[in-house]
């Protein structure tokens, strides 16, 4: 056994609960013990690190994230690996590169192989997430480029993605109103893939039918979907009222108003919401930028929109500019939920949704030592992936 590390703190969150005066012990990249300092013995010769009142918690898991500084995982292996390193400063220890091309899922698979062979310099990649190309068009007035990369739902086309990923795709988003969508949904579900509703202007009834075919997830709840009206519940109403559906939520308080965030949490509970970032432009100054598909973007005051878009027009934001710790902070500090609940929504909840909970998502004996340390404002102090410190403030 390699060197044993014992992390102590007045506050340890194991993914479900707060342990006061807790300790986490790990070695060889795996967690050896978690519990109270009073009842958990420290092995002889272990290196003991006392984090005082700072929080020790499971590393965050981002299941919907595109890139950073405008550099998208879809474009190259280099950008995929760079994203893995960049997001550790936000406490993320595992992520699904979110892509929409055959090349993109291939880069995610290559990055996985490199990490497994050479070790972890950034967040671990356990698979990929396809947001596209099988989506419904946005049909934004005067902006045909916004739909330029879309393809019709097709088993034959999907098989090209599946082959390039070597069977590692975890989730696929789909526009349920497109011809062939339900046939493809059933096909992907048979492969164990999570199928998610995304980018659709269809209504409640079609969403209920989509569930019967195997749609069990909602991509960035509220955003780019029909909203909740008391006579037209829309996709949003179907997702909020059905326990079959797990939901992603961008918790930066910009994509979704805090009151709408609170409604979602009250309807779904902590176990059925995953805090995601939809990250694209973090690390950039305000200014104009061009997306790989040619769409002109403007970053201003932490918001990324299509250049020239009316801020009141729906579907014109393009990803986000904030790391995952910001979402945890918002649920904890803005909405006032318990810190352990906010952490849960960024750790064990997304892990279970994607079938990753057997090895990550919580601090439990035998799981990977994916650990984050942060202060009371959820500023990240240290990020540990598989027992290796990959970021330190």
Image: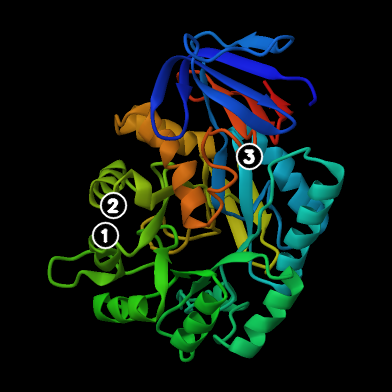
Coordinates of residue 186 in the picture (x, y in percent): 48, 82
How far apart marks 3 and 2 lie (CA) works out to 25 Å
Depth order, front residue of 44/107: 44
Q: Residue at x 48, y 35 (%)?
A: 326
Depth order, front residue of 128/9: 9
The first of marks 3 and 2 along the sequence is 3
Query: Could you say whether the residue bearing mark 2 is in a helix, strand or loop?
Result: helix
Q: Quarter of the image holding residue 292?
A: bottom right
Using residue 291 as the reference point, say whether residue 51 is left or right of it.
left
Coordinates of residue 315 in the picture (x, y in percent): 43, 64
Coordinates of residue 272 in the picture (x, y in percent): 36, 52
Q: Would residue 281 be seen by someone viewing this image from the given angle?
A: no
Decide: marks 3, 1 in contact (CB < 8 A)?
A: no
Residue 78, placed above or below residue 2:
below
Residue 341, placed above or below residue 276:
above
Crowd band around label 3 with a 10 angstrom C-alpha radius: few (<14), some (14–19), many (20+): many
The residue identified by callout 2 is 268
Coordinates of residue 129 in the picture (x, y in percent): 59, 63
Q: Quarter of the image holding residue 93?
A: top right
Residue with the most extreme right position:
118
Query: Could you say whether the residue bearing mark 3 is in a helix, strand or loop?
Result: strand
The residue identified by callout 3 is 93
Q: Residue at x 24, y 48 (%)?
A: 263
Decide: marks 2, 1 in contact (CB < 8 A)?
A: yes
Label disc, if present, on residue 240 of the rendered structure:
1
């Amino acid at each position: 056994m390699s060197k044993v590390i014992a992390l102590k703190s007045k506050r340890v969150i194991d993914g479900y609960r707060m342990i006061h005066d807790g300790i986490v012990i790990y070695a060889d990249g795996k967690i050896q013990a978690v519990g109270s300092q009073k009842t958990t013995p420290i092995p002889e010769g272990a290196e003991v690190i006392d984090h005082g009142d700072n929080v020790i918690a499971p590393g965050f898991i981002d299941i919907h994230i595109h890139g950073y500084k405008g550099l998208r995982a879809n474009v190259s292996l280099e950008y995929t690996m760079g994203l893995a390193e960049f997001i550790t400063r936000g406490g993320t220890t595992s992520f699904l590169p979110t892509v929409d091309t055959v090349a993109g899922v291939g880069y995610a698979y290559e990055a996985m192989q490199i990490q497994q062979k050479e070790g972890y310099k950034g967040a671990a990649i356990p698979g990929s997430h396809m947001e596209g190309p099988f989506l419904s068009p946005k049909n934004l007035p005067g902006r045909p480029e916004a739909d330029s990369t879309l393809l019709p739902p097709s088993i034959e086309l999907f098989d090209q993605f599946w082959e390039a990923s070597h069977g590692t795709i975890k989730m696929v988003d789909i526009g349920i109103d497109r011809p062939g969508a339900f046939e493809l949904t059933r096909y992907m579900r048979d492969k164990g893939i999570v199928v998610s509703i995304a980018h659709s202007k269809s209504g409640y009834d079609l969403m209920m039918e989509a569930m019967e075919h195997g749609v069990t997830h909602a991509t960035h709840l509220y955003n780019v979907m029909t909203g909740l009206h008391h006579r037209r519940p829309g996709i949003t109403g179907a997702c909020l009222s059905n326990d079959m559906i797990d939901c992603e939520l961008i918790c930066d308080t910009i994509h979704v108003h805090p009151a709408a965030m609170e409604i979602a949490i009250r309807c779904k509970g902590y176990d059925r919401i995953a805090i995601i970032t939809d990250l694209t432009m973090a690390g950039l100054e305000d200014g104009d930028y061009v997306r790989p598909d040619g769409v002109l973007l403007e970053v201003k005051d932490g918001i990324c929109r299509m250049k020239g878009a009316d801020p009141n027009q729906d579907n014109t934001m393009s990803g986000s500019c904030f790391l995952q710790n910001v979402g945890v902070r918002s649920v904890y500090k803005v909405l006032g939920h318990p810190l352990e609940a906010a952490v849960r929504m960024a750790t064990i909840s997304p892990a279970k949704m994607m079938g990753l909970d057997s090895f990550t998502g919580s601090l439990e004996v035998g799981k990977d030592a994916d650990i984050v340390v942060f202060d009371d404002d959820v500023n990240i102090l240290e990020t540990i992936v598989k027992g290796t410190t990959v970021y330190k403030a």
